[in-house]
Image (cartoon, rainbow, N blue to C red):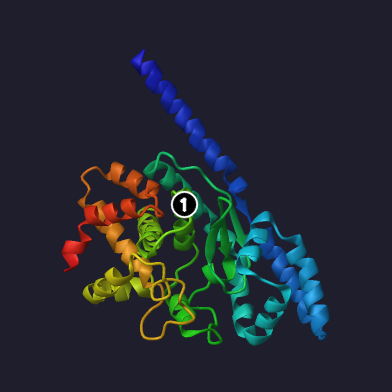
Amino acid sequence: MKHLLCSLFLCLLSVSVFAQKRDFKIYIETCDILNFWTAYDEVQKLSNPEEKVSIFQKLYVDKATFGLQDFIKSRNFSSGQWIESFESKPKFWKTIRNKTEKIQKDFKNIESLYQNFSQLYTSFSPPKIYFTMGNLKGGGTVINGNLIIGSELAASDKTVDYSELSPNYQDRMKINSGIIFLTAHELVHTQQNLRGTKTNLLGLCLKEGSADFIAELLTGKKVEAPYIDYGMQHQNSLWNDFQKEMQGDNFQNWLSNTATIKDRPADLGYFMGYIITKRFYERSKDKQSAINTIMNLDFSNTNETEFFLEKSGYETEVK
């Protein structure tokens, strides 16, 4: 009987894996990319500014998928802003096109992310991914449980002409190796405990940094970002600064500060959350339990996040 149940389980497992492979494309939506470049080409034929805005609105924005609709609302995109961007950053848009139009070459690797996640975390629930075209306001986000990728940033790398962009964007593109890691990071966000929205700096940094750490486990590759390299080399000084602010709700020195930070890499809060999570995982004897704790951590609960920090041992390590 035991052998029969075992055989039945293996059979069901193989069927499940086959079904997942067969149906994986139902989780991927890319028509926004096609619509974007169709609209872009039509805009290039026009000289009247109002006509440019109108045709872009008609061919791209009005045809938006549900994911792009949410992205537009969350970032306050407008057709006029896109037209302005085409005219002020023509080299970037021309050179990023090929990258975004061939984004499907990475779908097998993204499928592997889903499979790896289901093995790492038994409660994994596969979300839909919308590959959209944004306007340089974020490479990825999660809205209404869906993973939304801004492909113009996610797919950019050192081969793209980024000379018209800010230094922080240039630094990221110099080391970006494609869409896989960013997709893995955002995929983690779709599975995190995000029921509470209001949090302090520590909670928000743990949310982002833990997504980076889990993404490392999913991809088997280290995070490639300026904030990681800088953070590893300046842990003591960063911790001294961070602990003074981590209980507050002023994030400007640590997160979403690409446009304002001058003397060091942007988003160093990601590093702080990453290194705390990494140390927590490394100190845990039961790795599966550690993953469950990380994925279910309530970032809005200050008692939970402070206890997580304490259990990581990072406070005593870095002193």
Looking at the image, can residue 193 be seen?
yes
Would residue 37 be found to the left or right of residue 177 on screen?
A: right
SS at badge 1: loop
Question: The disc labelled 1 sits on which kind of residue?
Answer: Gly
Q: Position of residue 298 (x, y in %)?
A: 39, 50
Q: Position of residue 236 (x, y in %)?
A: 21, 73
Q: Residues within 10 Å of mark 1 (few under 14, many from 20)?
A: few
Looking at the image, can residue 155 be seen?
no
Would residue 131 be found to the left or right of residue 253 on screen?
A: right
Q: Quadrant of the N terminus?
A: top left
Q: Position of residue 5 (x, y in %)?
A: 39, 18
- Residue reaching furthest to the top: 1
In the image shown, does 301 or 211 lie closer to the viewer?
301
Vertical placement of 155 versus 52: above or below? Answer: above
Would residue 204 be found to the left or right of residue 108 on screen?
A: left
Q: Name the residue at 27% across, 69% down.
A: 243
Q: Name the residue at 27% across, 45% down.
A: 287
Vertical placement of 198 versus 289: above or below? Answer: below
Q: Position of residue 92 (x, y in %)?
A: 59, 81
Count numbered badges in the picture. 1
Q: Quadrant of the C terminus?
A: bottom left
Q: Name the residue at 19% across, 67% down.
A: 318
Dividing the picture into quadrants, the one containing residue 54 is bottom right
Q: Name the residue at 28% across, 53% down.
A: 308
Question: Which residue is the site of mark 1?
Answer: 196
Dividing the picture into quadrants, the one containing residue 58 is bottom right
